[in-house]
Image (tube, rainbow, N blue to C red):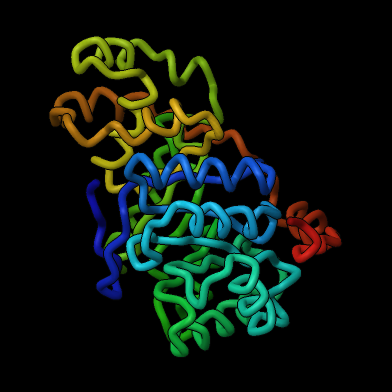
Amino acid sequence: MEYFTLNNGVKMPAAGIGTFLLSPKDAENAVLAALGCGYNLIDTANAYMNERGVGRGIRRSGVKREDIFLVTKLWPTEYADGERAIDATLARLGTDYVDMLILHQPVGDYIAGYKAMEKAYAAGKVRSLGLSNFPEDRIRKVIDECEIVPQLVQVEAHPYFPQTELKKFLAPRGMALMAWYPLGHGDRALVGEEVFSGLAAKYNKTNAQIILRWHVQSGNIVIPGSKNPEHIKSNLDIFDFALTEGEMKEIAALDKNTRYYNMSLEDAAKVYLSLDMDFDNRE
């Protein structure tokens, strides 16, 4: 495993498992499989409705809690009562702290939500803070109005949309980037690009492993999701080789500035703030 050092000195694994779209039981089994084959970064969220399952997987694994980097996210409807929401999140996960807590969407009273996370950080309930899906102007607003510069921003990133401009903003602030849709939402055109097929043959890897290796060498933290134990194991098998500078440039040429998720902030606010989700009503 390789690690990135965040701007508060906390070390974070470069690769982990995501649990988006997994049922509580599938998340439990995926976490158990992941921890059993060497993962130590797990990503979940209130909105995934599987935090209890993730917690069960951790406990079943027998891996010490301090050897796991656990990430979860607060949903916008929870921001206004953030202190209660954070305690409820910890209770669902069955832990007294998380290694990173993230605001999931840049809508609603996200400043109140971030300030609640800062209090949890000071109390030792959270080791690092992040933002998910925040554009640059709203990241600036958090930095300007709050006390702690976020450690990480989680956004869509892949070879067709490498977030070049955002990373220029994050770098001088020591803020890491975590990529969701790291394989382009499973787009066969992206995964099947000739450059990846050629490098896969050269290094005896899969196209997906080449893309994940590109992410890590680009400074991105990746969290590909799967409930298939073989896929889970394969996604972590990216640390025994390195792409050359020339190969990294070849991949950089694939940049189309094209994303797969295109909901506007206005539409996101209407949708996300209208959802009535009972996060405690899932086993």
x and y, in percent, of residue 206 in the image: 34, 18
| Residue 104 placement, left or right of 237 | right
x and y, in percent, of residue 105 in the image: 63, 60
Relative vertical location of residue 27 with respect to residue 128 in this rendering, above or below: above
Task: Identify the residue at horizontal 80%, vertical 61% (top origin).
Answer: 281
Relative vertical location of residue 207 with respect to residue 141 in this rendering, above or below: above
Front residue of 173/181: it is: 181
Which quadrant of the rendered structure holds the C terminus?
Answer: bottom right
Q: Quadrant of residue 86?
A: bottom right
Task: Identify the residue at horizontal 45%, vertical 61% (top origin).
Answer: 70
x and y, in percent, of residue 89 in the image: 63, 70
x and y, in percent, of residue 50 in the image: 66, 53
Relative vertical location of residue 211 with respect to residue 271 in this rendering, above or below: above
Residue 30 visible to the viewer? yes
Task: Identify the residue at horizontal 72%, vertical 80% (top origin).
Answer: 80
Front residue of 110/101: it is: 101
| Residue 252 placement, left or right of 45 | left
Task: Identify the residue at horizontal 32%, vertical 59% (top origin).
Answer: 12
Q: Quadrant of residue 200?
A: top left
Residue 163 visible to the viewer? no
| Residue 254 placement, left or right of 85 | left
Front residue of 125/261: it is: 125
How many marks on residues? 0
